[in-house]
Image (cartoon, helix red, strand yellow):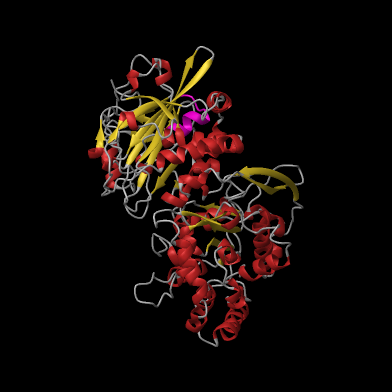
Amino acid sequence: MHHPYTAPGFRTYAWTLAVLGLSLSGCQVEEKKTADPSVTTLNQNYNRLHSHVLVRRIKTPTEANLDFAAYSKNVMLADPEWKAVHPATRVTLPGLTFGGMLQDVKPILDFTPLTEAEKAHPMAWTPILEHLLKWNFEKASGLANAYANVTGEKWGDTTDLAQPYQEFGSVYIHSKGNVKEVWVELEFKPWLNSFLDGVLDQDRDGYPEVVARLDSRVFTQDMVAEITGDYSTRNLSEPQVIDWSRNLASRWYPSYNTDILPQKAGSAWPYEETPEATKKDMAGVWVSNPLFILQGHPFADTLFNAFEVEGMGNAKPETEKRKEGKPVARGLDKGLTQRLEAIAAKMEKERKTYGAGDWAKWVSRLGRFQGDVRKFSAQEPDAVLGLMAPDKFLVFRRELEYLLAPDFTTPGAAASPVPAIAGFKDYLAAQGIDFLFVPIPTKLDVYPEYLAPHTDTLPGHIAQPLFRKLIKDLADARVETVDLLEPFLKFKEASESGKRALYQRQDTHWTTLGLETAAQMVAERIRNYSWYDSVYRDKIDYKVRDTVFENLGDIQARLPDAKKGQVAPESLMGRQIIDPQGRLYEDSDSSAILVLGDSYTGVYQTVGCRHAGVTAHLAKGLGGPVDLIMGWGGGPEAPGKLKKRGEDYLRPKRLVVWMMSARDLFVYPGGWTVK
């Protein structure tokens, strides 16, 4: 008997997440006839360890079903690299109690009291735990801490390995009279297989598993009521499912560089440019009219997930979806040279003040601070991307790497991004379009004191002098920038004990105060362009509406499991922008100003409270809408997204503003080329 969602060939080494509205043909998968599963896998040859694409159909679009389709046995989340481990003891069924958290351990699902209908509607553990932490942190933190004992067990092995040896997968709810029992699938990593006794790989996906009942004192009845309520029963609308997909992409981005793939209306996926390995894995399965497609791991072996949601996904042709903008009179702003000279002079002044006229000398003055950064970084293995600073201030490892990045001229250092950025500027200038580059400081640029006691030794309170050098290099290449670091540091100094923070404590991104400050700076620069008044002749008087939302952040999921239960959802304020008719602000692709951006332009605008992001506040400062092309997969990829839309897309554009994290200027995993 096979698990209803894992026919014998259930695996992949790549993943396609084209969720919603896929119409697929050419593949039949063995499914249980005695149950009516809510989620099915459609590509017959799917291999959790080796495929490049996962295609799933969601019959009923509840949040639980969507989460299960994304998290269950997904190659995207797999860790296929073999690990050499040396447990001191054999792993046996009687030993799988984890302090009593697991009870009634069974080798296969058929040995449990679950009915066929209950087996056919599993949920996924990871999003359930996150959902419960948001629901009631005080109650659910005990569950998170108990689960940390499961993922932290290494069976006497002393190997320095950050990955858990076993994790929970599917979750099942069994009705026993008036009581609801929670049963979980405990999956062991493939590289632990030779140390297991009595543990089978029932679904033959490479991950041996057992099934056990959770202690009802740990997973309580009110928790069961929460996950079997709206989470499992309320059908989402198509816009809500799209919001879910955006949140998924943003949630997974720090680990997997996930991004939503641009679609071609009227064309079945995979497209002509889709990697050949993915086409081969699809084995004749086509997805027509997808609502969205998610890709990940783009710098090595790109993976995709394709999800079909029944009854959804009626993409309109591009001409119907997009309001054509009018061509504008072109001609570059005449004040560029003067502004570039001012930017270069400012950076030169800093170099003389803090480095005695030498960038290397400036960097050498940060020795004690950089030592503190290295010590902080070493508290967790390199594979752990989320770290906890004092006062539960969460840090993304790549931002530590950014602080320690050497000059681009250093042997072995990453290639400088300046030629690629300058080349993109020249491409736009040839069409009479101005260009403005806005590198966004990391939160460790602004709050380095959370890492180290020696921040008082930082000249000018600047934690990465090479960021300043890069701005000078860009000015020398005639690329205009907006310097956000100086106003951010001034704002921080003026605020009360950091109570009005510019960055979220548990997330890599800024708060509404940070993005509003950035929007004000960029709007002020644009208002000084000679053509501004002609473009925004009829100004719109936008209003602001405050709202509050809660967020676990994008770093919490990267923490070691032992620390996840210490982090409660963060309450955040957003300021939504509203037009005079009371409608929430929407970006406009007919605008003369286009913003290209990474996730910093997506937070608050397309996820979270929405309609309150940096483009919304930029529009307020300008008196009219702007256009936005953003990707969760990283700022360096944004120009490629623009070029794929064709040169006609630029017809109404007068200015392109490229906003992206300064971190990716130094430590971007994909390297620096503008496609």
Residue 125 position within the rendered picture, expressed as x and y whole percent measured from the top left: 45, 33
Residue ranking furthest to the left: 194
Which is more toward the observer, 645 or 463? Answer: 463
Which is more toward the observer, 227 or 574? Answer: 227
Residue 25 position within the rendered picture, expressed as x and y whole percent measured from the top left: 33, 29
Q: Quadrant of residue 207?
A: top left
Q: Name the residue located 64 percent from the left edge and 57 percent from the top edge.
A: 515
Which is more toward the observer, 617 or 323? Answer: 617
633 on left or right of 567: left
Q: Image height check: is 390 above or below 66?
A: below
Q: Image height check: is 454 above or below 223?
A: below
Q: Quadrant of the N terminus?
A: top left
635 on left or right of 447: left
Residue 8 position within the rendered picture, expressed as x and y whole percent measured from the top left: 26, 28
Residue 402 position within the rendered picture, expressed as x and y whole percent measured from the top left: 47, 66
Q: Is residue 394 magenta?
A: no
Q: Main secondary structure of the magenta part?
A: helix
Q: Name the residue located 47 percent from the left edge and 27 percent from the top edge.
A: 215
Q: Quadrant of residue 234?
A: top right
Q: Name the residue located 35 percent from the left edge and 37 percent from the top edge.
A: 54
Which is more toward the observer, 296 or 388? Answer: 388
Q: Quadrant of the C terminus?
A: bottom left
Q: Image height check: is 230 above or below 498?
A: above
The stretch in magenta equals: 59-68
The answer to whether residue 424 is visible is: no
Q: Quadrant of residue 91?
A: top left
